[in-house]
Image (cartoon, helix red, strand yellow):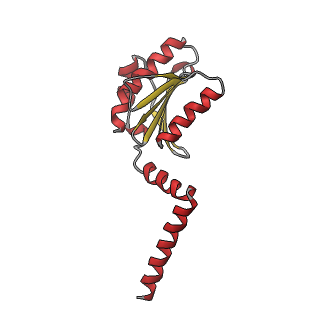
Amino acid sequence: MLKHALKLVSLLLVIVVGIGAGGVALDLVRLSAQTAAPEACSLLSVEELEKALGRPFGRSRQRQEQSGTSCRFTAGAGGSITVSVAATLKADFDQFRKLLTDEGKRPEAVSGVGDDAYYWDARIYVRVGSRSMTIWNGEPKQAGDKLRGEVLTLARLLAPKLR
């Protein structure tokens, strides 16, 4: 009985300290949201990517990132498409956009994709609930409009899968 009482007191202490510390509690919220984020490579197959963009890609490679996973598809001539998925809070998503703006960058709002989305530098950043996705087109020989078109096509295809 004493052993169970000590465990309960320890748990309550962790909760009280976490709430009082603010940052610890916030990290616990982020951690629980992170476990709900799907793995990036589960969102898109090579065949779906090739059909969507009309060009060949090699197999996908998934990596564990600090806050989620990324999936990289290589194409000819050194190009690639990378999809990253992570748990995120709306405030963090908004803060990154503000950081870009504060640094003189010009992220472009994109409507109709997820709950919120913006495009900047061959990447689209999408938020769907407590999940975020970044799609980056690393094709060095493509014109800017084509890069933008491809990431928007993929964002429209993948955003519903984050729900």
Q: How many marks?
A: 0
Q: Quadrant of residue 139?
A: top right
Q: Is residue 86 visible?
A: no
Up-down relation of residue 23 to residue 83 (above or below): below
Up-down relation of residue 108 to residue 39 (above or below): above
Query: As drawn, is 102 to the left or to the right of 27?
Result: right
Q: Nearer the viewer, residue 27 or 142?
A: 27
* Percent position of residue 84, x then y: 49, 36
Q: Is residue 126 visible?
A: yes
Q: Quadrant of residue 60?
A: top left
Up-down relation of residue 37 to residue 61 (above or below): below
Q: Nearer the viewer, residue 28 or 74?
A: 28
Residue with the most extreme bottom position: 1
Quadrant of the image containing the C terminus? top left
Residue with the most extreme front position: 20
* Percent position of residue 117, x then y: 45, 28
Q: Nearer the viewer, residue 114 or 65?
A: 114
Quadrant of the image containing the N terminus? bottom left
* Percent position of residue 110, x then y: 44, 22
* Percent position of residue 85, x then y: 46, 39
Which residue is found at the position 38% from the left and 36% from the top? 43
